[in-house]
Amino acid sequence: MKITLFEQAPYRYLPPDFEQRYESVCSTPYFPLVTSDGVYSSIRDFMDELMLGARAGFDGVAVTEHGQSSYDMMPNPDLVASALAYATETEGLEVAIFPMGRSLGKSREPVRVAEEYALIDVMSGGRLVAGFPVGLSYDANLNNGVPPMQTRPRFDENLELVLRAWSEREPFAWNGRYSQYPQVNIWPRTIQQPTPPVWITGIGNPRTMRMCLERGFGFNYLSWFGAKLTGKRIFDRFWELADQVGVPRNPYRLGFLQTIAVAETDERAEREYAEHLEYGFRKGLGSIPPEKLGLPGAIDIRGVQALLKDPGDFGLYYQMRNASFRELVDAGVVIVGSPATVREQIRQFCRDYGIGNLHAMLGFGSLPRDLAMKNIHLFAEEVAPHLRGLWADTGFQHHWWPERLGGVPLLASEGAAEEQPAWEEATVR
């Protein structure tokens, strides 16, 4: 199993009554709530936590993109990824750089995205994992002014252009619906050819899943609701689609985000982390109004059909604004406890659902620097070693990871992959 340290950059000092006074983290007034020292320390601690994860032996470090929001002050994750690429290469750290990433559904400069990712791959010596979400509705449609109906087709077109810009042998012209270039000929190109490993980040839309399976991309399910409430329906959907497409049920093609808090004992974990977890969900996801998550036209018809058939994909979302620590734990939204408690819960759901990539969110909400560092240390030393070998003896190969870091290019072993058993039939440690 591959384990990444997943971090966002929230403003950590919002007032206690924020969610009562303000409608949304997407339209938070800046100056009445913010100090320069608070912004600086939030970003600096976020960067230091990522570097700690790289030094502590995580397989990757991952960041996301959200514009104009107080819960993730990261308008362009490539800025952070480039700093991490240089610093880790200088220190000789064999860790993947994983911006999860650039929201192509809102981008009006897809060639710039291709150029930035290519430069990060070069700076890291071929350690980039390239993530592409379609884009949240509030970010693409409200913050960036992209009409909701254009979000998905813009994503599709931009993805094709980025992939071709990395791999095309000769300069080419591009005459798309949303962008036109008389010449595309980026310098440098990615070290990993024809492309770095590509992952699409989604929330369960069947169209997105099928596209990943048909094209050999990894699929990241960034659930803020945990595996207990929404996981089974999403993962069952994914593996059923894999059967329809005719690709192996290889767990390494699936990634999952889980918020985690580790302390010496279960009791101490609750005492130390409860208020910061409540802050993170009440003043983060819980403070995004539903109408801003999905403006009319932003979700394609297959996604709408799936939600109408089973609105359970939203999990605890409608209760997030007032969710208590106990409700978050009982619903599996967060996994909190001693190293033994945490690793057993993670191991169980990864085994049950065929998850080969865990994105561990260990810095969250208002969590202060010292506690975040403790959480990362304890997880790296006492949890991760017990999970990393989960699929090691099953015969599966990881085709969605940089070759420098042990990944196996997909095209080189497609025939062998077809003969592998489904993950349910494999014997795991």
Image (cartoon, rainbow, N blue to C red):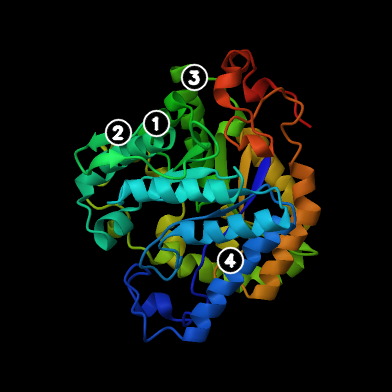
* Residue placed under numbered mark 4 in the picture: 325
Q: Quadrant of the N terminus?
A: top right
Q: Earlier in the sequence, mark 4 or mark 1?
A: 1
Mark pair 3, 2: CA separation: 37 Å
Residue 175 image offset from top left, x and y in percent: 21, 36
Seen in the picture, residue 25 relative to 20 is either above or below; the reply is above
Which one is closest to the eye, mark 2 or mark 4?
2
Does the CB distance between marks 2 and 1 fall below 8 Å? yes
- Is label 2 in a helix, a strand or a loop? strand
Q: Identify the amino acid type marked 4.
A: Phe
Amino acid type of disc 3? Asp
Element class at badge 3:
helix
Residue 128 visible, this orientation: yes
Q: Which mark is residue 272?
A: none
Helix, strand or loop at label 4? It is helix
Disc 2 to disc 1, C-alpha distance = 8 Å
Q: Is residue 3 above or below residue 328?
A: above
Q: Earlier in the sequence, mark 2 or mark 4?
A: 2
Query: Where, by quadrant of the figure, is residue 201 drawn?
Result: top left
Residue drawn 53% across the image and 36% down it: 197
**Is disc 2 in contact with disc 4, using a CB cutoff of under 8 Å?**
no
Marked residue nearer the N-terminal end (3 or 1)? 1
State the residue at coordinates (65%, 24%): 424
Q: Which residue is mark 3?
A: 243
For disc 2, the marked residue is: 172
Whether 416 is drawn above or below 172: the answer is above
- Specify whether 136 is left or right of 85: left
- State the image coordinates of residue 324 (x, y, percent, origin top left): 54, 67
Tell me which amino acid carries mark 2: Phe
Between the C-alphas of marks 3 and 1, the distance is 32 Å
